[in-house]
Amino acid sequence: MIRSILYTAALCLFLLLVGCRDDALISSTDLQFLQQGIVVNYSTGYYISHTEQVDTLYINQGQNVTFKAVYALNGQGLSMDSAINLYDLHYWVIGDDSINATTFDYDFDSAGYHPCILNTVDFSGDTLKDTVHVFVGTPLEISLVTPPLQSSVEALTDDYLELNWNVSGIDPWEKSSCTVYAAVSEDIPLSQYTHWIDILDSVSSLSANDCKSGIQLKGPLISEEWLKMYDIDLKDSSLTVYWGVKARVYTDNGFEEFATAVSAFNTLFLEGDSSVIQIKPTYENLVAGTEISTQIILIDALGDTLKKVTYDNPEEPLNIKVKPQSNLHIYTFETLRTDYEATPITINVPERTKIRLADSITFTDKVPPKAVPVKTALSIDDSIQFYFMDNGSGISPSQKKFIIADYDTVSAQYSSSVLSFANPCRRECNLKVPIPDNARNRNTELFWTLKFNRDSMYLSGPFAPKEEAW
């Protein structure tokens, strides 16, 4: 009873003192209507952010959230300058962290449930509490297990084919579903550059089911009607079956997340003891339309050369028929763009299969352009010219060109493989011409020496840094 009387007396004194201030913002009827709330700002990917007042928030591990305290008096929103006159202090509690700020960013690095509590203590000692229940999920990931990538299966058998996958990141508070897709193609190589996410929803949907289980496909995989429609004979043709799974997790509060994975397997030839290697090399930084001529040499495990073929169309794969064998060596050499080189590969060739080697053979250009002076003996007023040769990715004519005279850069003109610039030196100097090709190879070490006579000048070189110019 005594405590109640003392509290009432103190409250009356507080209201009397506040009411006597010239800038008093509250009266005895306003105090009980002070309200607080929490506004959060968070991203949902693809640069899309949300700012809203919520009591439950679903985000992923490692995500950043901005928290902001907001206040109202009698239902009317207050600016922070006005609100600060209505409370003694405020602080946030997230786990073991206590934060004294109106607005702050917080990174949720650990998965699980993380309550975020805003405490505001008014001048009478009362505490307002609001909580955002933050559920931090594990990022959703999916991997396709069987059939293995690029494996081969019977196309016309009545047996069942198992499609299995693994999904991680389904949290206890999330529901999940998986949709399985498939498409059949005769000659499209599987490539890391294919935008599978873009086309996944445009191919056939097989089923939608629980993400934690696979499905069985009843054979035959390919119908006789489909083969007749496209005039395909599986005796000497191998089809590629692309299949993918789109996983979805979601909550009843509107949160959802997707993950996608795609794989492929091939059908076996129905007859014969031969197989096919489908080769489609890639050429890094090669300008579209550039002519190529690639020699492909197949050598067996004993070192005998089996075949030599020429590949000259980088847009189309090349099919080479071979006998089934182990340790088949494939060597490739570019005869037109000789700066390009590729690492040899070794494969095993099972019987009745088509092995698609898209992106398995990659040509790279690691050779910088070569520069040769058009003339080494010049008059004082002549322009200095270098002829550039590049037998790889080429030199972009639009890229800004310059030379280095001792330690100064000098602009130069480039046309028809010739670099031209005015004499940049008043006395003997060293010139570097570090012009890059489209693969960003450039020679930054070699230099030429420009020397002078009374009415002429001449170039000597090139020299390496440790060589003495003569």
Image: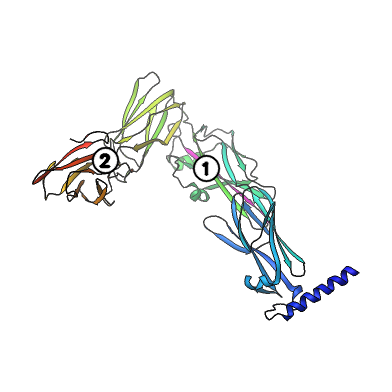
Return the residue found at the far top.
Answer: 302
Return the disc, 2 or 1, that comes first in the chain's sequence: 1
Q: Given the image, on which type of amino acid does mark 1 rest?
A: Val
Magenta stretch: dominant SS?
strand
Provide the residue designation for mark 1: 262
Whether the magenta-drawn stretch holds residue 272 is answered as no
Q: CA distance from mark 2 to mark 1?
A: 40 Å
Q: Nearer the viewer, residue 43 or 143?
A: 43
In the rendered view, does 219 fall on the left or right side of 193? right
Provide the residue designation for mark 2: 369
Whether the magenta-drawn stretch holds residue 241 is answered as yes
Secondary element at image label 1: strand
Return the residue found at the far right.
Answer: 1
Q: Position of residue 402 (x, y in %)?
A: 25, 49
Secondary element at image label 2: loop
Q: Nearer the viewer, residue 459 or 285?
A: 459
Position of the C terminus, as image quadrant, is: top left
Q: Given the image, on which type of amino acid does mark 2 rest?
A: Pro
Q: Quadrant of residue 56?
A: bottom right
